[in-house]
Amino acid sequence: MSSNKPTRQPVLFIPHGGGPCFFMDWNPADTWVGMGNFLKNVASTLPQRPSAIVLVSAHWLEPQFRVTGHARPELIYDYYGFPAHTYELTYPAQGQPQLAERVAQLISNEGLAAQVDAERGFDHGMFIPLKLMFPSADIPVIELSLRKDLDPQAHLQLGRSLAALRDENVLIIGSGMSFHNMRAYGDSHFSPISDEFDQWLTDAVASPASERDRLLQDWAQAPHAYLCHPQGDEEHLIPLLVAAGAGGQNPGQKIYSERVMQTTISAFRFG
């Protein structure tokens, strides 16, 4: 006897690259090819096509958590100094105001302040990777901000508040970078530094849920933590904590890793 209950979606933490990097020329030409290919393959690894996506972007910080509530959000080209054609990229995914209200309510139920933002568009932490992952742009997307204080415990709690959506065929994605020190990219001195931090992250993510959350809450104690994510600018790591919180008891695992611009970058999956 078959069940009509949707298959539970996993939770993902993905790297979104540098600006519109997948849609322009680089030297070396293959700088972002591996990461791009990983993103293009993500949809094929899911149990089924999601009915909606909730994406937490490193490029949206607010004093309190905010959720996009517009039915047809515009794109925000929040990158600078790139070729003209990259400001003409499109990704016409619709929003879903009803889901936005539900997300805000779920967050509030956890004791965290949250508001729906009916005007804000989609930033490049959303539309750049999703253009590769779901190029048809036919899945509704809700974007969720980080909180400006980047408090680890609050963002783990944020993830926990979203976990129930996974059973409703909603894919939760944390979009950031596992290594993000702008001054370090391209510097081979940071290769071993990023390796050590990446191994710590990999081990932490794979730990039993309670230990995982404890380790991630204290991520600043990891080897070279502030060399890999300079203090006060760790917004590209924090979406991983949201993903881990939404992962619940599901074990985490590394699903992609590559040396990019002399530093190790990875992606993780829960469930």
Image (tube, helix red, strand yellow):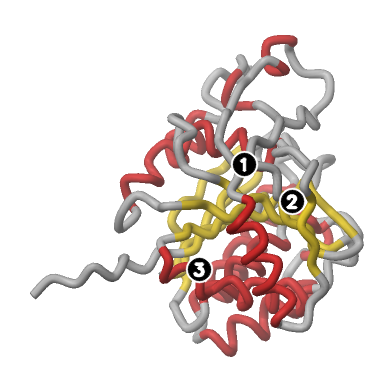
Name the amino acid, label 1: His
Q: Measuring from the top left, give residue 17's x and y in whole percent.
A: 64, 37
Instruction: Say how many tags the image has.
Output: 3
Nearest to the observer: residue 30 or residue 111:
111
In the drawing, does residue 201 fall left or right of residue 104?
Answer: left
Q: Measuring from the top left, give residue 173's x and y in whole percent.
A: 56, 56
Mark 3 vs mark 2: in front: 3
Cα separation, mark 3 vs mark 1, equals: 23 Å
The residue sitting at 73% across, 53% down in the picture is 236
Q: Quadrant of the N terminus?
A: bottom left
Q: Measuring from the top left, give residue 129's x and y in whole percent.
A: 56, 38
Are the two marked residues, 2 and 1, in contact with CB atoms closer than 8 angstroms?
yes
Cα separation, mark 3 vs mark 2, equals: 21 Å
Residue 225 image-quadrant placement:
bottom right
Q: How many neighbours does mark 1 have within 10 angstroms: few (below 14), some (14-19), or many (20 or more)? A: many
Which residue is situated farthest in the bottom direction here?
210
Name the amino acid, label 2: Ala
Above-or-below relation of 169 to 25: below
Disc with the residue nearer the chain's start (2 vs 1) = 1
Above-or-below relation of 196 to 181: below
Disc with the residue nearer the chain's start (3 vs 2) = 2
User: Is residue 228 in view from this perspective?
Assistant: no
Disc with the residue nearer the chain's start (3 vs 1) = 1
Residue linked to disc 3: 165
Residue linked to disc 1: 16
Name the amino acid, label 3: Leu
